Image (cartoon, rainbow, N blue to C red):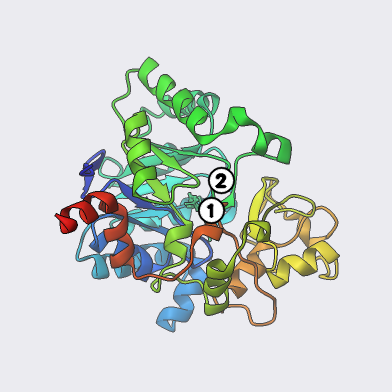
Amino acid sequence: MKLPELKIRNTTVQWPIIQGGMGIGISNYRLAGNVSKEGGLGVLSSAALDRILTERHGRKFKAREAAAQDVRDAKEISGGKPVGMNVMVALINQYADSVLGSMDGGVDVIISGAGLPMALPEIVATHPRANEVALVPILSSGRAVEVVLKRWARHGRSPDGIIVEGPLAGGHIAWKTLEEANDPANELTKLLDEVLAVVKKHNLNIPVIAAGGIYDHQDIVDALKRGCAGVQMGTRFAATFESGANENFKKMIVDAQPQDIELAHRPGSPCGMLFRVLNKSPFYQEAIARTRKPKCNKGYLLNKGYCPSKEENEKTFCICNGLLSSVNMNPEEKELWTVGANAFRVNKLMSVKDLMQELVHDKDAMQAQSAY
Ligand SMILES: Cc1cc2nc3c(=O)[nH]c(=O)nc-3n(C[C@H](O)[C@H](O)[C@H](O)COP(=O)(O)O)c2cc1C
């Protein structure tokens, strides 16, 4: 099947593939820039960009200026093709600055999840580029879509697309317990049908995008047949030469077996949502043995203004320190690796160009053609 293009508000992307934002520093300007160059939508992550840009450019950056510069750096690689920014709701301290900075830098799409992005339209409305930028929430139920629609309507805005993220995704997932995450009612296909029905009910002509466990061309075709306009993929892009993951992290993805992948819950992420990890991550090993003393000195992930992992290590562990370490930015701490449930299927690293070629072409059809 020839894959169609993806339209989100004023932005058209050649292939219906969004490379999901991956913090901290995994979906960096090189990864996102190259995905966009190859015709997908490359998405940066705003997490800790102040630190990352300060190191990359050798001068001090604050959050807003860092987000703007990251977009410009990615667009230099993409040749001006559209680029997105992922801003996690849980990064409360820098949320508005990251959104506005991305807009300063010329971002085309803002994607926001890890919580319900209630305030996004209000923040965006203060910027001169408000009408140019597409707003795409990441949601995991029809009910969440209804809540966001109602709230955004107060600011005269409705989502320009919706990413529906199921329980197989990397990073944080929407559920708090293993029972909920494993409940067949929460399988991605069910969530997609639910959200597609809500979108239809409200007569919204917007793309619905499937995320979580999408692995190959056939998965993309299946999502399109279901009524989606595209997919968002994380793990496959983390395992590219261009991603910001360090060599240890990339090797562990390639070597991963199904039993190496688990949902951290007790201790878990201070965000309160389940967080999928490679259980061999040295930082996670320390967390489950409770040998890492409570400590949070980075201040990005705050839950109601406070990070519990600063004071206890029984229920939570500080993810910022571990994630920074797995992009070689925090040598005093061990590494923490987050992946999607299908990471065990990755058996080699690839370039973004080769991965995009593999994803957009139907391998069977190509083989049949060459045999003929
Ligand atoms: C290493 C890694 C980091 C991630 N970080 C974020 C993040 O910062 N914000 C976010 O909304 N999603 C994050 N995600 C989720 C991805 O954007 C994507 O939606 C998800 O991985 C899709 O599932 P897949 O990995 O099975 O393709 C992350 C995923 C991975 C693998």
Q: Which residue of the protein is positioned furthest toward the left in this rendering?
A: 372
What residue is rendered at 39% in x and 40% in y?
136
The residue labelled by disc 2 is: 168
Could you say which disc has been placed on residue 46 in the image? Answer: none
Horizontal side, residue 190 vs residue 37: left or right: right
Q: Is residue 336 above or below residue 204?
A: below
Q: Is residue 1 visible?
A: yes
Q: Amino acid at mark 1?
A: Asn
Q: Amino acid at mark 2?
A: Leu
What residue is rendered at 46% in x and 55% in y?
234
Horizontal side, residue 199 vs residue 49: left or right: left
Q: Earlier in the sequence, mark 1 or mark 2?
A: 2
1 vs 2, front mark:
1
Closer-to-camera residue (234/306): 234
Horizontal side, residue 323 vs residue 138: left or right: right
The residue labelled by disc 1 is: 342
SS at mark 1?
A: loop
Say whether marks 1 and 2 touch (CB < 8 Å): yes
Q: Is residue 42 above or below residue 239?
A: above
Residue 142, image x, y percentages: 51, 25
The image quadrant that residue 219 belongs to is top left
The residues tagged by marks 1 and 2 sit, at their Cα atoms, a distance apart of: 7 Å
Q: Residues within 10 Å of mark 1 (few under 14, many from 20)?
A: many
Q: Which residue of the protein is positioned furthest toward the front in this rendering?
A: 372
Quadrant the C terminus occupies: bottom left
